[in-house]
Amino acid sequence: CFYYHEKNETPFVVSNEYPVIVFDEKKVFGEYVQLALRFGIAKQQLNSKAAGMAKPRVNIQEFLKITIPVPDLKKQKEIVKSWIDAKDLEKQAKRKKEIAIQEITKYILGEEK
């Protein structure tokens, strides 16, 4: 589990069991790190280091060994924007699909002529 707290948002406290990591905002865009840890090589590394039955965890020493590529800030922000745009398109497509299913259902049931 990851929780990323943006600078100007109200913090959400889960448990003092979770370590806090502060990023140098001049080098790393927090949303990029959050995204990078959820996909690709970083996710594979995390999965390989997780231990425990009910809720597998990675201890902080192992977490700090995780390697993720960190491009310049501009590129990090472009990657995050691209991800957000893709998620928005996905939501729009899902909504269009739901509307189409509703229309087809109405037509099949003879509610629309």
Image (cartoon, rainbow, N blue to C red):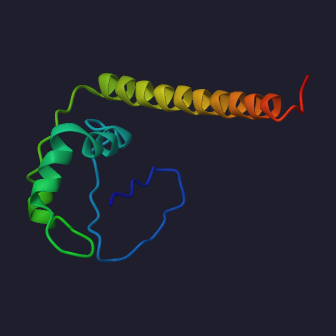
Residue depicted at x 54% and y 60%: 10
Please state if 53 lies on the left or on the right of 92 as rendered. left
Q: Is residue 33 visible?
A: yes
Residue 47 in the image: state x and y as whole percent.
Answer: 16, 55
Residue 76 versus residue 11 in the image, above or below: above
| Residue 39: quarter of image | top left
Please state if 36 lies on the left or on the right of 112 as rendered. left
Residue 76 versus residue 23 in the image, above or below: above
Residue 69 in the image: state x and y as whole percent.
Answer: 16, 33
Please state if 60 lies on the left or on the right of 54 as rendered. left
Please state if 27 lies on the left or on the right of 52 as rendered. right
Which quadrant is the N terminus positioned in?
bottom left
Which quadrant is the C terminus positioned in?
top right
Residue 93 in the image: state x and y as whole percent.
Answer: 59, 27
| Residue 52: quarter of image | bottom left
Q: Is residue 64 visible?
A: no
Residue 24 versus residue 95 in the image, above or below: below
Towards the viewer: 49 or 90: 90
Residue depicted at x 9% and y 63%: 61
Residue 58 in the image: state x and y as whole percent.
Answer: 17, 64
Residue 45 versus residue 41 in the image, above or below: below
Towards the viewer: 102 or 4: 102
Residue depicted at x 34% and y 23%: 74
Counting every numbered tag in the picture gives 0
